[in-house]
Amino acid sequence: MAEKQTKFIFVTGGVVSGLGKGITAASLGRLLKMRGYKVASQKLDPYINIDPGTMSPFQHGEVYVTEDGAETDLDLGHYERFIDENLNKYSNLTTGKVYWNVLNKERSGEYLGKTVQVIPHITNEIKTFIYNVGKMSNADVVITEIGGTTGDIESQPFIEAIRQVAREVGRENCCFIHVTLVPYISGSDEFKSKPTQHSVKELQGMGITPDIIMARVDQPMPQYVKDKIAMFCNVEPECCIENLTVPVLYEAPLMLEKSNFSTVVCKILHLDPKQIDMSEWSEMLGRVHARSKTVKIALCGKYVQLHDAYLSVAEALAHGGYENDAKVEIEWVDTEFLTKENMSEKLHGVDGIIIPGGFGNRGIEGMILAAQYARENNVPYFGICLGMQIAAIEFARNVLGYRDANSSEFDPESAHHVIDLMPDQYGVKMGGTMRLGAYPCKVLGPIMKRAYAAEEIAERHRHRFEFNNDYRKQFEEKGMLIAGTSPDGQLCEAIEYPADDFYIGVQFHPEFKSRPNGAQPIFREFIKSAVAYMEKRK
C-alpha cells in the first residue's frame, strides 16, 4: 500500500504584524476538519529565544502549554480551540531551538566535520520539524504559520525551508497563503492594494508565489479591488479572499467559507472537497448570539495591561458563558494597586473572582486581598495555579492565624511556608524545567465531582511550587478540603472551601483544554455559580 501523502499549507504574512495569520490558519483547520480531514497545526517563530517560557508576558502574552509539556506561542491556543486537537512538541519551533539543535549535533560530530551553514543545515532542521508534526499526528493536512512578516531578516531561513518543502513533496501537495493588509483611506474613499503587491513581490523574490491572498480588511472590498489584487499578484480571482473583522472570533471560519475558502484550498491541493458539516459550529454560534444574561468577573492579576497575557483564561470564561446563556464581562483588576482601603470599591458588584497563574511577588498582596474578599463575602472564587496558592496563603493567614504565612517563592524567611518548592525543583535552571504538561488527578471534592463527573482526570501543569503537606491537617480541620490529589495522594492538586457555594483553587491550568463548543468543566461551573450569584443579588 502506498504511503499516505500529507498535504502542506503554509501561512505567511506581509505589510504589518498582528493581521490574524493565526486565526486564518486556525479557521482553515476547522473548515478542513468539517470536511472530514485530520489536521495538525504548527507555528514557526523567528525569535532567538528557545521557547516563550522565560519571556515576559508583556513582550509575548501568555505561554501556552501542550499536553506533552511544550511551552509554546499563544497562537497554538487558537489552533487547539478551533480544530479541537491536542498539539505537541513539534507544533512550535523557534530560531533559537533550531540553532540549539544544530549546534548540539555539530558538537556531537553528527555532521562529520562538515562546515555548518544556514543552507543546508538550518533549513534541513526546519524541514525535519515540519515533516515530523505530520508523522507524529498522522495528519492528512499540516498547516504551518510562519511568524513575523515577509522581508524580516529573521524569517528568511523559514521561508527558504518551506520553499524547499514544496520542491520536495511536489507543488501539487503544497498551498501558500499570504495574509496582507489592504488599508482603506477614508479621505479618498479608496482601498489601497499597493502594500499587498509589494509584499507579494518580496515573497516572490524568495522563490515563493502565493496561491491565495488573504486580504485583511475592516469592511467589504469592492470586486474591482479583488480583481486588481488577483491580476497583479498572479492568483486566480477566486483566490483573493477578504478576511473581515468579526464581532465574535469563532465566526471567522463561517465568514471565510462564504468566499469558498476551504473549497479553493482543496482544489489547489487536489483534495476531494467532501461534504462540509458546519452544524456543530453553527449551533455553538447560535448559543453565542442568543445569550440573554450578563455576568461580571473580576480577573485579578499583575499583567492585566496586556490582555493577551491571560488569553486562554479569557476565552475559557467566554466558553463557560456560552453554556450558561451568559455574556461574560471581564473587569481587569491590577492587584499591584489593590489595597485594603480600595478593595471593596474595586470588587463591589462583581459576580465572580478569578486569579490566574503567574510568577514573582509583584501584586501578590493584592491577590491575597481579592481571595479574602471572595471568601468572606461568599463571592464565587476560582484560583488557577498561583490562584490556588494565593487561596491557601490567605486561608492560612486569616483562618489558621499564621500571619506571616506565605510561599517560599515570595518570602524565604517566613516561618510558615504553606506553599513550597517542589522537591524535584531544587537547584534546577530556568527554561523548560518546571512541572509541565498533563498529569492525572484524583477527583475528591464536591465542586470537582460536580464539574467532571469522573473519579480521575488529567490536566496540564506549569509550576515549580506546590501546597505544603505539612499543613494539610490544619487546613482540613478548619474546613478547607483537599479536593484533588495525585493518584498516590501525595500532591495536592485542588482545594475547596465547602462553606461557600463556589470556592476552588486548582494547581493545574484548566483553561488550556477549554473549547468554544465544549467549555472546560470547572469554568462552566464557575460561570454557572456566577450567574446564580448575580440573580440572587438582583
Image: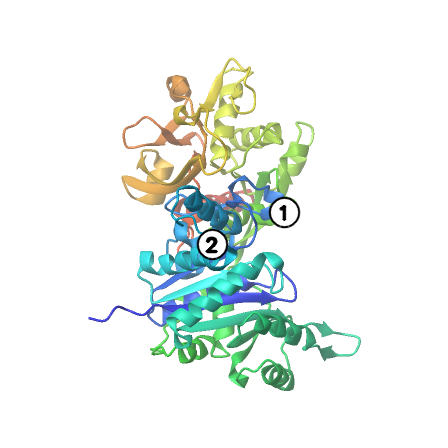
Q: Give whichever of discs 1 and 2 has the lower sequence position.
A: 2
Which is more toward the observer, 17 or 35? 17
Residue at the far top in the pictured view: 415
| Rendered-image quadrant of the N terminus | bottom left
Q: Check the image and report above or below for 18 versus 485.
A: below
* Residue at 50% across, 55% down: 117
* Residue at 44% across, 47% down: 101
Q: Amino acid at mark 1?
A: Leu
* Image location (x, y in percent) of residue 158: 51, 60
In the image, taking residue 231 as reference, residue 8 lies left or right, namely: left
* Residue at 64% across, 86% down: 224
Determine crowd level at label 2: few under 14, some 14-19, many 20+ residues with C-alpha closer than 10 A: many
Identify the coloring.
rainbow
Which is more toward the observer, 440 or 295? 440
Taking the image as drawn, is residue 49 in sight? yes
Determine crowd level at label 1: few under 14, some 14-19, many 20+ residues with C-alpha closer than 10 A: some
Which is more toward the observer, 258 or 20? 20
* Image location (x, y in percent) of residue 415: 51, 13
User: At numbered mark 1, what does the secondary structure look like: helix, strand or loop?
Assistant: loop
Taking the image as drawn, is residue 146 in sight? no
Q: Amino acid at mark 2?
A: Leu
User: At numbered mark 2, what does the secondary structure look like: helix, strand or loop?
Assistant: helix
Tag 1 and tag 2, C-beta contact below 8 Å: no
Residue that mark 1 sits on: 306
Q: Quadrant of residue 341?
A: top right
* Image location (x, y in percent) of residue 347: 62, 37
* Image location (x, y in percent) of residue 65: 44, 45
Q: Check the image and report above or below for 178 versus 50.
A: below
Residue that mark 2 sits on: 76
In the image, taking residue 494 as reference, residue 115 lies left or right, namely: right
